[in-house]
Amino acid sequence: MNKKRVIALGALVLAIGVGIYWWASGASVWTMTEVPVETKDELFGTTSIQWEPGFRLGLEYAAPAAGGLLVIAGVLLWMVRRDRRRTAGTERPG
Amino acid sequence: MKSTTTLKASIILAGMMTASISAYAQGLPGSGQKTITLSNDVGKNQFEWLSDAPVEKIKGTAETVKGKLTLDPQNSSSLRGTVVVAVSTMKTGNSTRDNHLRGADWLDAERYPVITFTVTSVSNTRVNGGRMTANVTGKFSLHGVEKTLTIPIELNYIPESDKTRERAPGDLVSITATFTISLKDFNISGSRGTIGSKVGETIKITAKLFGSTGA
């Protein structure tokens, strides 16, 4: 299989992966480096929030990353089509 | 036959009404004026807040909450005191956003370092054992603006025991209150175009307070 096509498909898959990861992380606009964890107080029956180190990818990084990968995939696939047209042109029966 | 049935029903109804009135009329456990000092030894004192806007939901907390309240358990309406929240301890999980929140465009922690609530009156109290619900009216001060708010609360009063002494001396008290404020009412305008899209016009706040009478 054409090397450029493989890389393009790889970039496409990565872009989709970034999107899915962002969505599964809570679809935040902003990246979080601490996450709220609810803990229960057994005596009073109340809950409180503890902030614990954690990572949730935000759109401010996910969008450029996925966008960049899509651009790479698009450029490479365009190059594949261009190369194919050139090859088809040189192989035209005389 | 019919008059006997009616009489029985009346007696049962009278008994139920007396029991329910008694439940509401009795005070919390304990007596005498108590001073309740908020302490994280008893439970995590915290304000949780939620901004629900079309672009995103932001959940945050204010971590440093202090205060002193006074209460006569036999007179639930006697609850008074002040709760103070440090603006600089606001957290949302993103340090850049936290700094914006404390900045001049938003809460302006440098000019207005604290949020306070001072209880002025209590109404509509209902007591059942160690649990009390009531409407608390007081002065809420945020971003240099003071407004009178009436907030429904639930107070739980646990008399001192071996179990409670594991946390703190004295009787233990927890108070939970949920209310909503409008940012516009407190002159908080934020960055242009943010309120209404990225930040909700109203913020839902849940105050969770814990203290003891033994401090």
Image (spheres, coloured by chain):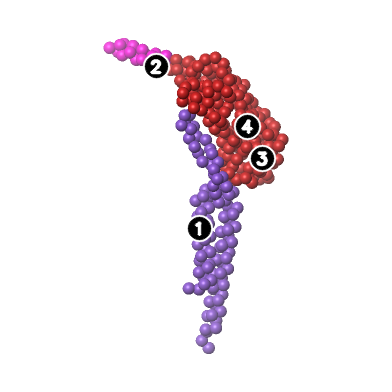
Amino acid found under the numbered disc labelled 2? Met
Report crowding for label 3: few under 14, some 14 to 19, many 20 or more residues within 10 A (C-alpha).
many
Q: Which chain is red?
A: B
Name the residue located 60 percent from the left edge and 31 percent from the top edge: B65
**Dot 4 and dot 1 within a common chain:** no
Name the residue located 66 percent from the left edge and 43 percent from the top edge: B100
SS of the residue at dot 1? Answer: helix
List the single residue furthest toward the left.
Answer: B1
Q: Which residue bears the numbered disc 3?
A: B102
Name the residue located 33 percent from the left edge and 11 percent from the top edge: B7
Q: Position of residue B35 (x, y in %)?
A: 58, 20
Q: Position of residue B20 (x, y in %)?
A: 43, 17
**Mark 3 — on which chain does it sit?**
B
Q: Which residue bears the numbered disc 4?
A: B85
Q: Which residues are magenta?
A: B1-19
- Cα separation, mark 3 vs mark 2, equals 54 Å
SS of the residue at dot 2? Answer: helix
Which of disc 2 and disc 4 is earlier in sequence? 2
Front one among B166 and A85: B166
SS of the residue at dot 4? Answer: strand
Q: Which residue bears the numbered disc 1?
A: A17
Q: Which chain is purple?
A: A
- Cα separation, mark 4 vs mark 1, equals 42 Å
Amino acid found under the numbered disc labelled 4? Val
Q: How many marks?
A: 4
Which of disc 4 and disc 3 is earlier in sequence? 4
